[in-house]
């Protein structure tokens, strides 16, 4: 049986997952960028020509036993891009103020005539 309105399972498919737009403050972005830039591996990527493209928070929502709900962005992902040849994804633990993981993807194209 198809999902209504082409939205897929659990109402997803439009990109907003039914929660609407999330606005990220410049203060949060700046904090995450500063944490990223303090990491020596990220510093090397920036020196090698990568540029910061965006900052996306990872938001977790916790429901306590008494029903209290808390939502917090404790982690963020910073995307670095180098021309059309490279992309790096940097995971930042905001609470511990440190980079926890870096994934680097590179592309090499050899054109022949």
Image (cartoon, rainbow, N blue to C red):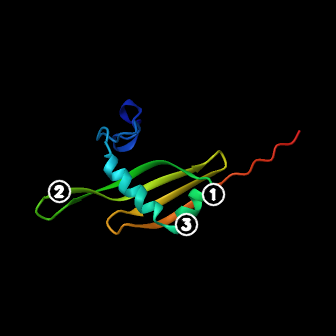
Residue 97 falls in image quadrant: bottom left
For the N terminus, the image quarter is top left
Report the Cα–Cα distance between label 1 and label 2: 43 Å
Which type of secondary structure does the marked residue at label 3 adopt?
A: helix
Asked whether 49 or 80 is in front, the reply is 49
Which type of secondary structure does the marked residue at label 2 adopt?
A: strand
Q: Residue furthest left?
A: 66
Q: How many marks?
A: 3
Which type of secondary structure does the marked residue at label 1 adopt?
A: loop
Question: Nearer the N terminus, badge 3 or badge 2?
Answer: 3
- The residue to which callout 3 is attached is 41
Crowd band around label 1 with a 10 angstrom C-alpha radius: few (<14), some (14–19), many (20+): few
At 80% from the left and 47% from the top, the residue drawn is 110
Question: Nearer the N terminus, badge 1 or badge 2?
Answer: 1
- The residue to which callout 1 is attached is 48
Residue 48 falls in image quadrant: bottom right
Asked whether 47 or 28 is in front, the reply is 47
At 64% from the left and 45% from the top, the residue drawn is 83
Report the Cα–Cα distance between label 3 and label 1: 11 Å
Which x, y percent locates residue 3?
Answer: 38, 36
Which x, y percent locates residue 12?
Answer: 37, 41
Which x, y percent locates residue 20?
Answer: 30, 38
Residue 47 falls in image quadrant: bottom right
């Amino acid at each position: 049986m198809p999902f209504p309105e082409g939205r897929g399972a659990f109402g997803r498919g439009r990109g907003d997952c039914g929660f609407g737009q999330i606005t990220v403050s410049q203060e949060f972005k700046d904090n995450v960028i500063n944490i990223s830039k303090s990491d020596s591996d990220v510093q090397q990527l920036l020196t090698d020509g990568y540029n910061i493209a965006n900052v996306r928070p990872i938001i977790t929502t916790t429901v306590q036993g008494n029903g209290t709900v808390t939502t917090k962005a404790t982690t963020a992902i910073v995307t670095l891009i180098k021309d059309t040849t490279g992309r790096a994804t940097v995971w930042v633990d905001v609470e511990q103020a440190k980079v926890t993981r870096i994934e680097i993807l590179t592309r090499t194209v050899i054109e022949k005539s």
